[in-house]
Amino acid sequence: MGVPSLTAGDGTVLPAIGFGTYKLTGSAGVASVAQAIRAGYRLLDSAVNYENEGAVGRAASSATGVPDELVVTSKLPGRRHRYAEALATIEESVYRTGLDRIGLYLIHWPNPKVDRYVEAWTALIEARERGLVRHIGVSNFLPEHIDRLVAETGVVPVVNQIEIHPYFPQREALDHHRTLGVLVQAWSPLGRRSDLLGNPTITAIAGEHGISPAQTVLAWHVARQVIPLPKAAGSERQRENLDVFGIALSEAEIEAITALGRPDGRTAGQDPAVYEEF
């Protein structure tokens, strides 16, 4: 079964699940990403700060018989928000991947105290116009940050990649993004460093469907039209994470999982209103 797709307000089409690559580096990273591509992943996540654009690009460029819809993603670090520095960084990202252009480029964090994310966004717009990247978006932006980008540039991000999992379901943010036509990707979709996959609600629903707790959580993301980006180095887990599109959770099950949300649900307390990463 192929991976379904979701469509942004501007018509951009992206796979409904992606592959996270944080900490997948070097030759082992190339092997893991290549394995994920063979398993069926067509959306690959990366970032300058992950220091693995080369590994992801090498795996993508060496894949044989892969359709044109393979989308490699990277992200601009906070230390490169100034316009000229941002453009040079994007160029270097393209060179490191070895690809002709990068499929999706995001601003990694808004860093609002520095307050150069609009300047960085204008650089991403220029990079898209120059053909360095195909699509542009953001990561870890709050709704007010996105509203400001749109107000000042007129360009709506295709994607916002944010922390979402059952302990932090982001209901209001999802509603806002849908209004704007912005697709939402979920990092830490399985609630890393938490007890989520052992939660009784998750394990009970998994048992009812004869699936794993991880598949249950990923099916919840899919039902909410969120693009999860699970990371897995092993081939068996990669395939299991991909095999979620035939799982039909009931409305009651989806709501029961969403109800696990907590006010302090962020896995590492990284609130984009104050957290900064360079």
Image (cartoon, rainbow, N blue to C red):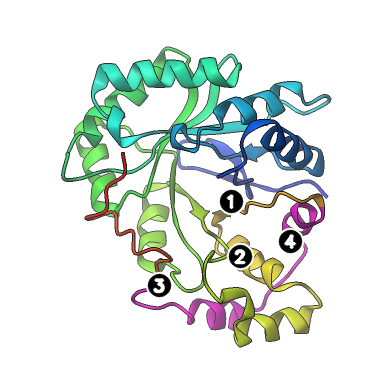
Residue occupied by mark 4:
244
Q: Are marks 3 and 1 in contact (CB under 8 Å)?
A: no
Asked if residue 106 is among those painted magenta in the image, a careful observer would answer no
Residue bearing the label numbered 2: 223
Mark 1 vs mark 4: in front = 1
Q: CA distance from mark 3 to mark 2?
A: 20 Å
Taking depth in this image into account, of 209 and 165 the one nearest to the observer is: 165
Which circle's residue, 2 or 1, is located before the other in the chain?
2
Q: Secondary structure at mark 3?
A: loop
Callout in the foreground (4, 3): 3
Residues in magenta?
Answer: 236-265
Give the mark nearer the N terminus: 4 vs 3. Answer: 4
Q: Please tell me in which quadrant of the rendered image residue 157 appears.
A: top left
Residue 159 seen anywhere in this rendered image of the structure: yes
Q: Which mark is residue 229?
A: 1
- Whole-Å distance between the Cαs marked 4 and 3? 24 Å
Please tell me which residue lies in front, 258 or 230. Answer: 230
Residue visible at 44% across and 36% down? 49
Measured as percent of width and height from the top left, residue 146 is found at: 29, 45
9 or 87, which lies in front? Answer: 87
- Whether residue 128 is visible, yes or no, is no
Quadrant housing residue 112? top left
